[in-house]
Amino acid sequence: MDQKKLRLPPTELVDPNGREFDRLPISEQLERLLASQAHAIEMVQKISQLIALAAEAAAKRLRGGEGRLIYAGAGCSIRIGVQDGVELVPTFGWPLSRVGYLIAGGSKALSVSVEGAEDDASDALQQVDNCSVSELDVVIGITASGSTPFTCKILESSIARGALTIGVSSNPKSRLIEIADHVLVTATGPEVLAGSTRLGAGTAQKALLNCFSTALMTQLGRVLGNEMLCVQATNAKLKDRQARILAGQIDGIDEGGAYQLLSELNWDLRKGLLVASGWVEDDADLALAGERPFRELLRPL
């Protein structure tokens, strides 16, 4: 029994100090739960430099091309990955064609449990093949235990196809560490509810992916200062926001002039900023296609 316990990932261990959790007053239960959440964030902060290196590598791979950011995993982990990925389109204007998901058990597993899906390595190979993963892509494998067969096989197969791989785990001694190009481990330890990785490990995954993808999109030219440049202006509020951003960033143009220019450019804020700062429109299009950090493009011409 002791040998079996030694093989368990930290997220599956039972914290002996939590045996009386269900007997505690609700206020004390919440204190323990919130403390575990704060600990999860601390674990993400500890690996900030590793997250930065992974974001830089991903930006280099994706910049100016057609490569995709692909999230892979099973259960709670891939649900968190999908949540991060779907927000890239409305928040950063990231093309829908450049984000993908490899989900153990298929899309239905996002809402219902598919028994045995996380152990199906053959399905992982099939999904990588169907997705046509290539050297243009960045594949993020997310697994709290770090040893989920589906996720590990996704990364192995993706590496064989030349993709850049990033492994996200809460187990510092996992199989994932031996596979991924960039390994991001948040040592969150045993959960308040043993094995419920939607808690500490899940919070760490969410925070890590939030930070990673925001830094990545900034490197790919979709943020200026602390403002989003690629939110689609689908209503009056967002059009007004774009005009305020442009007027605030470019000297000599007020909000009225910014609004007029953006309307002429089909509400492409990035192009508007470049044109207002002196770029010819065709040159601005070419510059934006290179997906450099946007601040670099605002240097004096």
Image (spheres, helix red, strand yellow):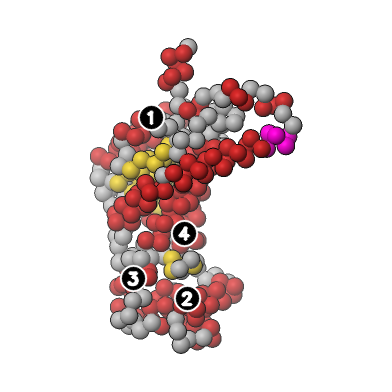
> What percent of the width, then of the height, locates residue 94?
42, 60
Tell me the amino acid under the disc marked 2: Trp
**Label whose residue precedes the other's in the sequence (2 or 1):** 1
Please provide the residue range marked out in magenta.
Answer: 26-30
Q: CA distance from mark 4 to mark 3?
A: 23 Å
Q: Residue 145 bears which disc, if any? A: none
Tell me the amino acid under the disc marked 4: Val
Rendered position, 248 above or below 17: below
> What percent of the width, then of the height, locates residue 68?
35, 53
Q: Residue 296 bears which disc, if any? A: 3
Specify whether residue 27 is painted magenta.
yes
Q: Main secondary structure of the magenta part?
A: helix
Which quadrant does the C terminus fall into? bottom left
Q: Which residue is mark 1?
A: 173
Rendered position, 284 above or below 182: below
Instruction: Report helix, strand or loop for mark 2.
Output: loop
Q: Which residue is mark 4?
A: 89
Classify 10 Å Cα crowding around label 1: few (below 14), some (14-19), many (20 and above): some
